[in-house]
Image (spheres, rainbow, N blue to C red):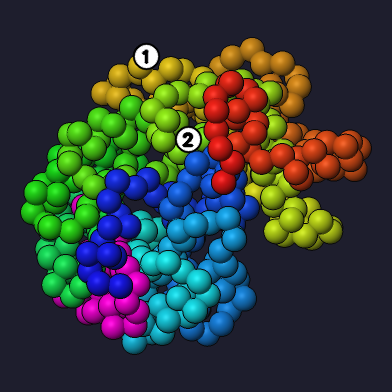
Amino acid sequence: MDPAERQELFRDAVLMAPLTRGGNLPFRRLCVELGAKVTLSEMAVARDVVRGRRGEMALLRRAPQETCFGVQLADRHPEQLAAAVQIAVEKGADFVDLNLGCPIDLFCRRGLGAALLRKPGKVGALVAAMRGATDLPVTIKMRLGYEDDKPRFMAVATAAIENGVDAITLHGRSRSQRYRRAADWERVAELVQAVDIPVIGNGDLLSWRDVQRAKEHSGCASVMLGRATLIKPWVFQEIQDGRDYLLDADARLDILRRYRSLALAHFRDDERGRRNVHGFILWHLDFLSRYRPVPSEQHDPELGPLMQTREEVRELADTPQGWLDSSDSQLHEKLADWLIEEIDSAPESREKWDHTPASVILETSTGASISSP
């Protein structure tokens, strides 16, 4: 592929962010059924990929339904990173991404993720190694900088471009900010004006209107969605169709049942597999329970994101639907237990959701005309 072909992939696209734990293969499959076109793996540590560690290698696996799949890698050693890139490509990646944004202390202390924002020269060497290992697209995902008062994104972008990067994702926060402040889309706009490769904007995009505003304001070529994906995985279809799909608890519970089926198929329907699925359902409920069916035109992004905080107190029915809407972790545990028990207590339900894609649930619930992937 020549540079123009590689860059074209990241123009007018909506990417699913690399989501540690949340971006597991069955959840990505669910998102594909709900309109996702470009997906990324969870972050994989290049050293562990090269060593062939089973858990890390599993992160490189793609579902056949993923039409454009990228692998995100983390490392600080060029030769090791290049070797991991070659393995990712052999496993079927369509592009490879370098993590320059992970804020977790464990990784930053090892010089990975956002820690590399302090060393633009090192980033250049890493990108050069990736570029030398494949002719597929090479991208980076970064934050504004490591410290709040020392933005380094422009220097890092320059080093990456000089060494052959094809697109840059910029999350409009520093490492020290984590998620305490709103994403700074002025900085995204600055980068767009300064470079001639696609810039992918990221941060606080929780509705199709947020995406529309962000692209108009910043001029970014594409966007990447993180938390929105976890809160309402059908956000991809909303963006594609330019409209809200307001789902009631019944429809969202059915989407969760569909995820259960996809997860059981991936992790296996045995005792260990069911424990894994239970754990992932419980993890996802922390995000899925934040959804509220509020039309996006009623939301002012200046007042806060279109999601619900944990502090809200409401009267909820003591039913699976009520447990889904609750922020109570004990009720989430109850719902996860119920979903696993339903596999045996209602086998007809299991059979149904094994064969009903999430797009059909969305279509049935909203009356929209949605084509299955």
Magenta region includes residue 123: yes
Front in this rendered view, residue 24 or 35:
35
Q: Residue at x 9, y 49 (%)?
A: 193
Q: Are marks 2 and 1 in contact (CB under 8 Å)?
A: no
- Judged left or right of residue 128, residue 110 is right
Residue 231: percent from left, percent from top: 51, 35
Residue 35: percent from left, percent from top: 50, 41
- Judged left or right of residue 86, residue 302 is left
Q: Residue at x 26, y 39 (%)?
A: 183
In front of the other: label 2 or label 1?
2
Disc 1 marks which residue? 298
Give the crowd class for mark 1: few <14, some 14-19, many >=20 residues within 10 Å. Answer: few
| Disc sitting over residue 248 in the figure | none
Vertical comparison of 20 with 286: above or below: below
Give, as a single range, the part of the protein colored magenta.
116-144
Q: Residue at x 58, y 21 (%)?
A: 366
- The residue lying furthest to the left in this view is 194
**Quarter of the picture holding the N terminus:** bottom left
Residue 187: percent from left, percent from top: 15, 45
Front in this rendered view, residue 300 or 91:
91
Q: Amino acid at mark 1?
A: Gln
Residue 121 visible at all: yes
Q: Earlier in the sequence, mark 2 or mark 1?
A: 2
Residue 358: percent from left, percent from top: 63, 38
Q: Residue at x 32, y 30 (%)?
A: 210
Disc 2 marks which residue? 237
- Judged left or right of residue 52, residue 125 is left
Q: Quadrant of residue 113?
A: bottom left
